[in-house]
């Protein structure tokens, strides 16, 4: 076991995959000599050279489109969007090209590629460096969408994403990059795409979360146990699409109550899909309203500390929402 | 090391330069550049004291490319200003107090703590607020210019973008529509050598100023650290635009003397590059030039220092933003219009200058 933070785990995953398979390459803005603006690709340029670690111009459309071309031609590109907020110029490539290449070629073309994107608020990045825009991609058929919350999952899921035959959108919550260190299994550690994890067992209600919300939900669960005697089960979805329905419904069957938490705004958010799945297929186990706790309905995370604090979902808000649901 | 002035196509007709600058204009140019540097130095100090959330972004070394073009604008012209061009806001009439409050996210800031650092513009002085994705704003400037054409108004839309932005497809879309419709738009390419860590040679194979000819209009390259050279090129471009003679691309070559943001250690920049460009510092050069003409540059810098001191005190006295106000402004409750900006060039204040 090695102890590392999420950023180190991501770097280690790319390093190992590049070492293992010379088709794996990295491209993006400032990923080369600079090593990425968060340092995720630090050292890869020196180790693998400019042919496999490409500093691109500021052209997200090109980054996604060229990654698609490289993938079609047999490489395994890992593209970095400097911030998830910057992905929109690439949206056309991702939706029109990347997500549907396999389907429209009747299965004859595949795009084995990963798009890594730092997302989320809590770092005073304001409207253009804080977005949680995963729902645009979870609603696009043909993409897999992953959002890890621990170093071990970040490493294992990124390695699995690189090896996946289809395009994977890999969301990394930037606040978690250096938030904590934890054990990561040695060796070729893989976490399968499409499997959720019960991060904390409980009997009174289920909290469904992903990314940074895992850390917040676990903290909230400890508070609930200590102060209320409520045992919350925390389910880290880890992969948003394909959704691990069996684990989600199994948890609701045990607890009878579901709280779905995410930082993105609520209306049309990914939580709506989780909630609808539970409402439709877990109905007979429910003992309370399926509840969503999500970011407010404003166009982005505002800048100032006090406003950002108002926006962000943290342990306290989760405790409040869980108390209300537990009391139902 | 100097920047070679070039024009594409070279045989373009002349425009009756130079535009007239009075002694008061020259002092104003210096004053706005000093105002930008002093305010940014103050904001950096506030950042280091933990009073500016997130990171801090400035335009040190680029004061001439910010102030020169803005100074050429008339009151009815409009500006889409980039994050390294604080001086342009000052030329148009924004004061340093609200800027410092903005950087600290305070209620007295331009966006009342909603958006960050240089992501602001005061619509009352005809300026448009940038977004992080570059050069999105080049297309917005073209849209303003299309509106001017429709209304037959002799106005100019002027915008700034960096060398990195010229790689993006939207830049080409902006250049193309500007050329097709002969839009009254002035496009200022601030080539500060770096798109974050990416140097010019990884951004383009051909100097972007040469591309203007391919879109059917004039491209002109000037020394971006010579405020009068940038002003003269912009003044001629604005005049052409007002006369319906179409857009101009001006490449002002300069150097980003600080990191992309305060968090950037700039390890990718060769040390000797800083020394070369430090010797070309736009403010020092202009101070020397004005001092040689008998201008009391010391009094200009003292008055700026005093104004920024007072502004800092005012900004620090501004309250924190109210979370209860954070939901305000999602949908319309007013119908804001872009107002006219200040135009301190004597041409606009005194037609006989």
Image (cartoon, rainbow, N blue to C red):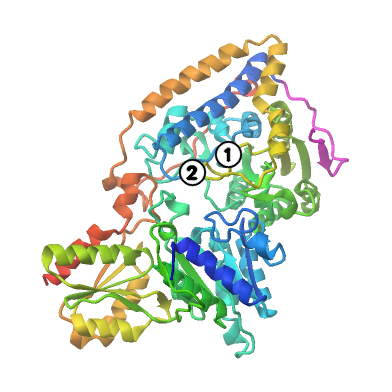
The answer to which image quadrant residue A66 occupies is bottom right
Depth check: give the residue in front, A122 or A153.
A153
- Determine the secondary structure under disc 1: loop
Chain label for disc 2: B
Depth check: give the residue in front, B333 or B80.
B80
Residue A20: image location, x then y, percent:
62, 76
Which residue is labeled 1 in the image? B84
**In the rendered image of this protein, does residue A224 appear above or below residue B268?**
below
**Distance between the Cα atoms at labels 1 and 2?**
10 Å
Residue A85: image location, x then y, percent:
49, 59
**In the rendered image of this protein, does residue B122 appear above or below residue B312?**
below
Chain label for disc 1: B
B15 inside magenta stretch = yes
Q: Quadrant of the N terminus of chain B?
A: top right
Q: Which of the numbered marks, if any, corresponds to residue B203? A: none
Q: What is the chief secondary structure element of the magenta stretch? A: loop
Q: Circle 2: is it few (<14), some (14-19), or many (20+) Cα within 10 Å?
A: many
**Residue B327 in view here:** no
Depth check: give the residue in front, B125 or B131.
B131
**In the rendered image of this protein, does residue B159 appear above or below residue A311?**
above
- Determine the secondary structure under disc 2: loop
Horizontal side of B112 relative to A16 (left or right) equals left
The residue positioned 55% from the left and 29% from the top of the image is: B36
A286 inside magenta stretch = no
Question: In the image, which residues are magenta?
Answer: B1-20
**Residue A224 in view here:** yes
The answer to which image quadrant residue A91 occupies is bottom right
Are the residues flagged by discs 1 and 2 from a single subunit?
A: yes
Residue A276: image location, x then y, percent:
30, 79
All told, the count of numbered labels is 2
The residue positioned 36% from the left and 49% from the top of the image is: B329
Which residue is labeled 2 in the image? B119
């Amino acid at each position: 076991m090695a102890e590392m933070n999420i950023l180190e785990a991501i770097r280690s995953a790319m390093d190992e995959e590049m070492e293992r398979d010379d088709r794996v390459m990295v491209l993006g803005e400032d990923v080369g000599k600079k090593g990425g603006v968060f340092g995720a690709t630090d050292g890869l340029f020196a180790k693998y050279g400019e042919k496999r670690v490409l500093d691109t111009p500021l052209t997200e459309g090109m980054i996604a489109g060229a990654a698609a071309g490289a993938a079609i031609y047999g490489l395994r590109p890992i593209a970095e969007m400097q911030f998830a907020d910057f992905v929109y110029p690439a949206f056309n490539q991702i939706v029109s090209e990347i997500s549907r290449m396999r389907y429209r070629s009747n299965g004859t073309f595949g795009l084995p590629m990963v798009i890594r994107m730092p997302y989320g608020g809590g770092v005073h990045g304001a409207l253009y460096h804080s977005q949680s825009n995963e729902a645009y991609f979870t609603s696009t058929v043909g993409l897999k969408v992953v959002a890890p919350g621990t170093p071990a999952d970040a490493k294992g899921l990124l390695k699995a994403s690189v090896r996946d035959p289809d395009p994977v959108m890999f969301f990394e919550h930037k606040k978690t990059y250096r938030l904590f260190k934890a054990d990561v299994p040695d060796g070729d550690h893989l976490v399968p795409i499409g499997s959720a994890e019960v991060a904390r067992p409980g009997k009174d209600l289920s909290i469904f979360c992903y990314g940074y919300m895992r850390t917040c939900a676990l903290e909230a669960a400890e508070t609930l146990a200590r102060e209320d005697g409520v045992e919350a089960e925390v389910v880290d979805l880890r992969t948003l699409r394909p959704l691990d329905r069996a684990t989600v419904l199994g948890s609701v069957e045990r607890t009878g109550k579901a709280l779905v938490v995410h930082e993105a705004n609520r209306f049309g958010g990914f939580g709506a899909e989780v909630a609808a799945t539970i409402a439709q297929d877990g109905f007979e186990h429910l003992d309370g309203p399926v509840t969503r706790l999500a970011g407010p309905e404003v166009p982005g995370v505002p800048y100032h500390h006090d406003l950002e604090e108002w926006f962000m979902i943290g342990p306290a808000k989760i405790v409040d929402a869980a108390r209300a649901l537990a009391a139902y | 090391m100097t920047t070679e002035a070039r024009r594409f196509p070279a045989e373009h007709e002349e425009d009756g330069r130079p535009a007239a600058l009075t002694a008061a204009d020259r002092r104003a140019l210096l004053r706005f550049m000093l105002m930008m540097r002093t305010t940014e130095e103050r904001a950096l100090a506030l950042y280091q004291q933990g009073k500016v959330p997130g990171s801090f972004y400035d335009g040190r070394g680029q004061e001439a490319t910010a102030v020169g073009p803005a100074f050429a604008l008339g009151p009815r012209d409009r500006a889409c200003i980039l994050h390294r061009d604080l001086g342009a806001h000052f030329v148009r009439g924004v004061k340093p107090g609200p800027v410092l409050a903005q950087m600290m996210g305070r209620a007295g800031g331009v966006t009342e703590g909603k958006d960050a650092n240089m992501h602001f513009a005061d619509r009352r002085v005809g300026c448009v607020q940038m977004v992080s994705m570059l050069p999105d704003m080049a297309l917005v400037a073209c849209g303003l210019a299309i509106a001017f054409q429709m209304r037959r108004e002799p106005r100019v839309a002027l915008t700034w973008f960096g060398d990195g932005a010229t790689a993006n497809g939207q830049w080409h879309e902006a250049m193309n529509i500007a050329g097709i419709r002969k839009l009254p738009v002035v496009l200022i390419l601030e080539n500060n050598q770096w798109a974050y860590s990416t140097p010019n040679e990884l951004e383009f194979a051909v100097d972007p100023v040469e591309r203007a000819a391919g879109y059917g209009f004039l491209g002109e390259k000037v020394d971006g650290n010579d405020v009068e050279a940038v002003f003269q090129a912009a003044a001629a471009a604005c005049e052409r635009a007002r006369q319906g003679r179409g857009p101009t691309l001006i490449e002002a070559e300069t150097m980003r003397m600080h990191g992309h943001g305060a968090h950037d250690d700039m390890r990718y920049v060769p040390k000797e590059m800083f020394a070369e460009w430090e010797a070309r510092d736009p403010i020092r050069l202009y101070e020397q030039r004005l001092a040689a003409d008998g201008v009391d540059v010391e009094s200009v810098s003292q008055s700026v220092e005093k104004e920024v001191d007072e502004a800092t005190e005012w900004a620090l006295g501004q309250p924190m933003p109210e979370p209860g106000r954070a939901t305000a402004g999602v949908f319309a409750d007013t119908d804001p219009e872009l107002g006219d900006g200040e135009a301190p060039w004597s041409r606009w204040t005194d037609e006989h200058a």
